[in-house]
Image (cartoon, helix red, strand yellow):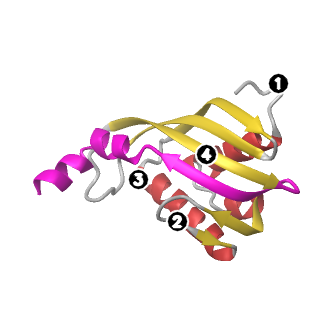
Amino acid sequence: MDAGEDVPEAVRLVERVLVEAFAGGRTEVIAELSSPDLVEHQFGMQAVGAEAVARARLAARQVHEMAPDVTYTIEDWAQHDDVTWVRAIGRGTQTGPLLGPPSGRPFEITVIDVVRVRDGLIAEHWGVPDRFALLSQTGALERLTTG
């Protein structure tokens, strides 16, 4: 995104989470930008409050360990009332574990994040990373289906 672009606060919050926490490994950013009563809806991470924040931080740590070179680019966004949709592209190389040893393969996946922001903090989150593409591009899917 262009720094001068007129972008909603919710998009900037999602960008900070992706860039600083998932790509940068600074998982404390998630706690800083999340409401204490965060409701997390992402598959496999569903939780509320401190548990939701802890699960999001764990996911960010795992992504960063799997691909320390991962970058995220916000491609587009939409907003309706208090709900904001963000589509980002994640690109990196699997040099850390992902359902097995590192493959060294590059990947490019789409990530959809939907957030509700309240009082400048993420109060509710739905995340839809293209896990199938990640598993396929890194070779993990092949290991799962043949082994």
Residue type (three-letter) at the residue carrying disc 4: Asp
Rendered image: mark on residue 4:
1
Quadrant containing the C terminus is bottom left
Residue farthest along the right direction in this orientation: 119
Front residue (pair 59, 126): 126
Label 1 to label 2, Cα distance in Å?
Answer: 34 Å
Residues under numbered marks 1 and 2 in contact, where contact means CB atoms less than 8 Å apart = no
**Residue 125 included in the magenta stretch of the image:** yes
Q: Which residues are magenta?
A: 118-147
The reply to whether residue 53 is in sight is yes
Q: Say if the magenta span includes residue 43.
A: no
Location of residue 66 in the rendering, given as x and y in whole percent from the top left corner: 41, 53
Residue at the image point whose x is 47% and y is 48% from the top: 68
- Considering only order in the chain, which callout, 3 or 4, is on the residue closer to the N terminus? 3
Q: Quadrant of the N terminus?
A: top right
Mark 3 or mark 1: name the one nearer the start of the chain.
Answer: 1
Can you give x and y, in whole percent of width and height, for residue 78 in the image? 71, 33
Q: Using the image, tell me which numbered label, if any, was put on residue 45.
A: 2
Distance between mark 4 and mark 1 Cα atoms:
22 Å
Q: What residue type is disc 1 on?
A: Gly
Asked if residue 104 can be seen in this view, the reply is: no
Image disc number at residue 113:
4
Give the amino acid type for the residue marked by disc 2 in the picture.
Met
First reached walking from the N terminus: tag 3 or tag 2: 2
